[in-house]
């Protein structure tokens, strides 16, 4: 089961701001700016496109044995479903409490309510 990031209008806005900054840095480069301005323009472009396309990227991938939590730009965390001791549903997030004492958080605002319901049913099968 793949669960993508839910549509968040603020992410589009953040993406367009990054792209606007990229254009400003490119203007600086065209007016004789440094290599640093060009590098910042490239970085801002990548960030802008990433934020605009974030809803096409999976947030959670649940297979028969693992759940993988993708954290936007900073990597992913893979958890074996057998390691989950319990899950605690709170107002804004669900905490996965692992048998080794660690905790992983799933943010409710990043997925749709239907997908959240399916996910909780899946956790109840394993916990």
Image (cartoon, helix red, strand yellow):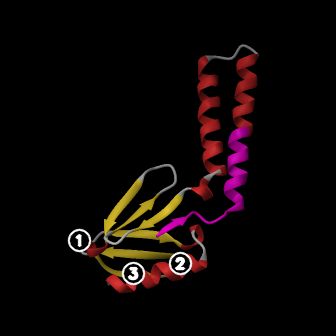
- Note whether 1 is above or below 77 in the view shown: below
| 30 part of magenta stretch | no
Residue visible at 65% across and 30% down in the picture: 41
Task: Give residue 74's position: percent from left, percent from top.
Answer: 46, 50
Q: Residue at label 3?
A: 123
Q: Considering only order in the chain, which callout, 2 or 3, is on the residue closer to the N terminus?
A: 2
Q: Considering only order in the chain, which callout, 1 or 2, is on the residue closer to the N terminus?
A: 1
Q: Residue at label 1?
A: 100
- On screen, residue 97 versus residue 16, left or right, reads left
**Structural distance between the alpha carbons of marks 2 and 1:** 25 Å
**Structural distance between the alpha carbons of marks 3 and 1:** 18 Å
Q: Considering only order in the chain, which callout, 1 or 3, is on the residue closer to the N terminus?
A: 1
| 9 part of magenta stretch | yes
- Note whether 30 is above or below 10 in the view shown: above
* The C terminus - image quarter: bottom left
Q: Mark 3 near mark 1, Cβ–Cβ under 8 Å? A: no
Q: Residue at label 2?
A: 116
Q: Which contiguous range is marked in magenta?
A: 1-19
Residue visible at 60% across and 56% down in the picture: 56
- Note whether 53 is above or below 58 in the view shown: above
Q: Count residues near mark 2 (Cα–Cα under 10 Å), then give few for <14, some for 14-19, many for 20+.
A: some
Question: Based on the displayed image, in which of its 4 quarters is residue 26 positioned?
Answer: top right
Q: Count residues near mark 3 (Cα–Cα under 10 Å), then give few for <14, some for 14-19, many for 20+.
A: some
* Callout in the foreground (3, 1): 3
């Amino acid at each position: 089961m793949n669960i993508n990031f839910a549509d968040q209008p603020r992410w589009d806005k953040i993406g367009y701001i990054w792209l606007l900054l990229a254009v400003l840095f490119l203007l600086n480069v065209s007016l004789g700016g440094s290599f640093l301005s060009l590098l910042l323009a490239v970085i801002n472009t990548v960030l802008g496109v990433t934020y605009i396309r974030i809803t096409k990227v999976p947030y959670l991938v649940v297979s028969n044995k693992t759940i993988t939590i993708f954290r936007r730009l900073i990597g992913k965390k893979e958890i074996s479903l057998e390691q989950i001791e319990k899950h605690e549903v709170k107002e804004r997030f669900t905490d996965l409490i692992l048998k080794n004492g660690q905790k992983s958080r799933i943010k409710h605002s990043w997925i749709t309510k239907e997908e959240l319901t399916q996910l909780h049913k899946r956790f109840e099968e394993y916990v």
